[in-house]
Amino acid sequence: MNKMTFLLSGSLIAVTAAASAQMSCGDLTPASLGLQGVTFDEVIAVPAGEESPAAQCRIRATTAERVGTDGQDYALKFELALPDNWNGDYVHQFNGGNDGEVKPAKGSLPSGTGGLSALERGYAVVSSDAGHNGKANRDKGLAAGAVFGHDFEARQMYGYKAVAVLDPLARDIVEGFYGADIDHAYGVGCSNGGRHAMVAAARMPDAFDGLLAGAPGFQLPKAALQHALDVQQFTSLTGDLATAFSREDLGLVSSKITEACDGLDGLEDGYVADSASCQATFDITALTCTAGQNSACLSADQVNVLQTISAGTDADGAPYYSDWAWDTAIGSGGWRF
C-alpha cells in the first residue's frame, strides 16, 4: 500500500514537533482559514479535566448540508480537537456501529493506543457522525439508526465518502490553526471504525501514514442479510424478539458450552480458548427437552433456531455472511441485548 504502514495492534508513537505562527482559539472562523462550505457551530478553549484529557481548542462544525431524496435533512457534523501541546501529527477517528453521532474526538482505542489517548499524546484529532443523525428517527425503534439507508448519498457517506470529504477539510483546519504542516497522519477505529480504516486503505492509500484497525466489520450488506435471518428466527418462536429465549435458557446454553469445551485448550479455567475444537465438540441438540421434561432444557424449536443462526446459511447451505462460534457469552446481558 505504497508508503502506508498498516497496524493491527500496537500503539501510536508521538513525535514532538514545534508549532509556529499558531492562531488563537478565539480567532478561529471559516473565513480566517479561507474555508467555504463549512459552518463552525462552536469554537471553545477547553482545559484539561473531566471533559477533555488535554487542554485543547475544540471545534464543532457542520459541512455537506443537503436535503435527501427521502425528504430528511442531512449534514456531515464533526468535532476537531486541537491540543495546546501539539506534537505535529494528526488522527482521524473512525467511529463504530451505524455512526450517526459525533463521538468526542480523543483518538482512543484501548486495544491499540494503550492507556493514553491520541489527544493526550498531543495529536490533533477529528471525529464525525459520517453524514447522518442517528437520532432523527426515534419513532422507528430499533431500526432508527439505520433509516438513513433509504437515501443513496447517506449510504455512500456512511460507506466511505464521509472520510474522503472530511479528511482534507480537517487537515486544512489543523494546518491553518497551527501555521505548520502535519508531519504524520493516522486513522484509528474499531468495528465499523475498523471497516472505515480498511476502506480508507483501499480507496485512499496515500492519505494515511498508518491505520489502526480494530475488529473491522466486512461485507456489511451480507451481514445485514444475516441480521435479518437472526431476527426472523427469533421472532418465529413467540412473535417477540425479547421473549424468544429467557435469561435462564441462554444461561443454560452458556453453561453447557463451558462444560463441553472448557478443557479442550488443555486447562479447565472457566474459559473456552479453543473455539475451533468447540465447534466440533459441542452439540446443541443434547439440550432438547425429552418427553415430560420442562426444565434445564430447550424446546426442539429453540434448538433449531440456535442451530440455524449459528450456521448462518440458507436452505441450500449457502452462507449469508459467516457462521458463529458457540460462545459462552451467549448467556451474558450484552449478547442478549
Image (cartoon, rainbow, N blue to C red):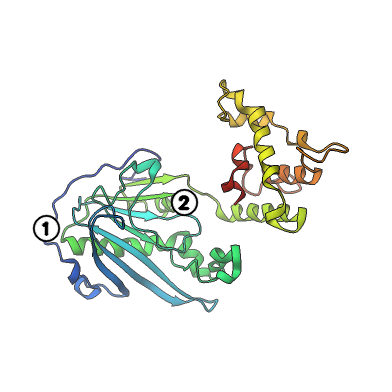
Q: Residue at x 70, y 48 (%)?
A: 246
Q: Residue at x 25, y 53 (%)?
A: 54
Quarter of the figure that contains the N terminus = top left
Q: Compute the Cα span from label 2 to label 1.
A: 35 Å
Q: Nearer the viewer, residue 266 or 51?
A: 51
Image: 118 above or below 105: above
Mark 2: which amino acid? Arg
Q: Residue at x 33, y 63 (%)?
A: 79
Q: For mark 1, what is the residue?
A: 20
Q: Is residue 7 visible?
A: no
Direction right: furthest residue: 291
Disc marking residue 263: none
Q: For mark 2, what is the residue?
A: 195
Direction top: furthest residue: 266
Q: Residue at x 77, y 44 (%)?
A: 304
Tell me where residue 118 appears, x and y as whole percent. Answer: 30, 49
Tell me where residue 323 appears, x and y as whole percent. Answer: 64, 42
Direction left: furthest residue: 21
Q: Secondary structure at mark 2?
A: helix
Residues under numbered marks 2 and 1 in contact, where contact means CB atoms less than 8 Å apart: no
- Sequence-first tag of 2 and 1: 1
Q: Nearer the viewer, residue 122 or 50?
A: 50
Q: Secondary structure at mark 1?
A: loop
Question: Dot 2: within a 10 Å radius of its alpha carbon, few (fewer than 14), some, or many (20 or more) residues?
Answer: many
Q: Nearer the viewer, residue 297 or 208?
A: 297
Q: Give the side of residue 333 with respect to residue 76, left or right.
A: right
Tell me where residue 60 appears, x and y as whole percent. Answer: 32, 67
Tell me where residue 35 appears, x and y as whole percent. Answer: 26, 72
Mark 1: which amino acid? Ser
